[in-house]
Image (cartoon, rainbow, N blue to C red):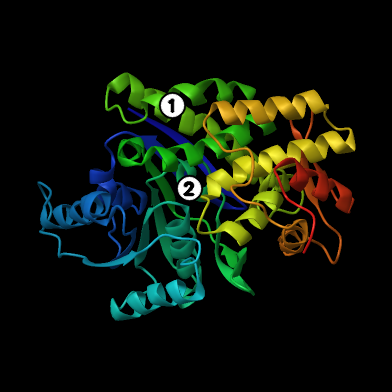
Amino acid sequence: MTRELVQCVGERRAPVIIGSGILDSVAARVRTMNGGVDPTKVLIVCDGAVDATWGQVVADSFSASHATRGQDQAPRSAVDVTRLTLHASEANKSIESWQKILAAAIEGNLDRKSLIVAVGGGIVTDLAGFAAASYLRGIQWLTLPTTLLGMVDAALGGKTGINLSLGGGALGKNLAGAFWPPSAVICDVATLSTLPVRDFRAGLAECFKHAMIADASIESLLATAATSYTSREAGEQWRLIDLVARSAAVKLAIVARDPREQHERMVLNLGHTFAHAIESQLSDEVLHGEAVALGLVAASFASAASGRMTLEQARSVRARLAALGFAVQLPRAIAMKKLENAAGFDKKRVGKALTLVLPLGDGGAQIVHGADGELLRAGFAAIGAVDGE
């Protein structure tokens, strides 16, 4: 019970495998992808929340794989497997955590034929990928996302990175990083059954975004997923596979056309200029997907202020996100100026010009270069930002 897509980032192609109950065969899949050759060493970078569960499944896969022998094969020598556990938080998506991974790679004596394996959500994925891009100027890595947000967004597209401090406790999202696509993305939807409902719902925001951008039919799958994702029944697992595959397909198609985010790929940042500014102020209070949901509301009202969609359409986006259980107002008052300043550090900025991605009333999104600052303020005001410093 699997679906397989292909990720194309420039000339690099890699499988995106989506299924249920497939983590225990990860090592065999790696060997097959490498033409029957095992990596020399493996470093597993795991989110502490899943280290004892899914991290152990992955580690056991490598141990069991290398302890077996084929009918006409000599016994395989065990591959050295090193495990590093990280606490996944935006504050921990830092230079210090990146250095810990590099230190673990050195201690594990990883070489150019070694493999880094990320097990967890978007934070661990971004950290491990950036370490893989940096170590020995780039070694192979594999990502095994265990969150919905990771499966439909963070693990796809080849972007890796860490946050940098903006001072005063604020964080600049992904301000250091690299384009370094993984050798494969393996999504086991069985891992979603162990997620807290809040974390699962956070991933629905990215699915909703993909529905707004390119495939409106995705939205019809979201309400059911939000109530049935913990089920291990085969039909429910297949529905999750379908949701992940359809949402991932939107991002993969855009990435294939614009791998380095020079033009079209920017539409995938719909809502994110607002979301990253929100996260810079509320990193300990909101999850990334919750910030994205707020950002989609803000972007919709900014779009209405620009005439690209009607006020009724913006209100509809807000109502539909609220129906999925998302907060559509900031959890506490934040000064408009703080959010504006944080938005000024967005990666889509060119010089002093602000770039916004705004949804269109009839579907899709438009990249607006040199956007009027009033649109930014209209979006933040719609989610409860207050005047002042």
Q: Is residue 251 above or below residue 1?
A: below
**Residue for point 31% across, 36% down:** 193
List the residue tagged with mark 2: 14
**Residue for point 64% across, 26% down:** 319
Provide residue 42's location: percent of width, then percent of height. 29, 65
Residue 225, numbered label: 1
| Residue 255 seen by the camera | yes
Q: Nearer the viewer, residue 10 or 244?
A: 244
Provide residue 73's location: percent of width, then percent of height. 13, 53
Q: Check disc 2 and report its element: helix, strand or loop.
A: strand
Q: Are marks 2 and 1 in contact (CB under 8 Å)?
A: no
Provide residue 323's location: percent of width, then percent of height. 56, 26
**Residue for point 53% across, 51% down:** 286
Mark before the other along the chain sequence, 2 or 1: 2
Q: Check disc 1 and report its element: helix, strand or loop.
A: helix
Q: Quadrant of the C terminus?
A: bottom right
Q: Is residue 217 left or right of residue 69?
A: right
Around disc 1, counting alpha carbons within 10 Å, would you say few (fewer than 14), some (14 to 19), or many (20 or more)? some
Q: Amino acid at mark 2?
A: Ala
Around disc 2, counting alpha carbons within 10 Å, would you say few (fewer than 14), some (14 to 19), or many (20 or more)? some
Front position among marks 2 and 1: 1
Q: Is residue 26 above or below residue 309?
A: below
Q: Nearer the viewer, residue 28 or 369?
A: 369
Name the quadrant containing residue 236. top left
Q: Is residue 182 left or right of residue 80?
A: right
| Residue 363 seen by the camera | no
Residue 242, numbered label: none
Name the quadrant containing residue 303. top right
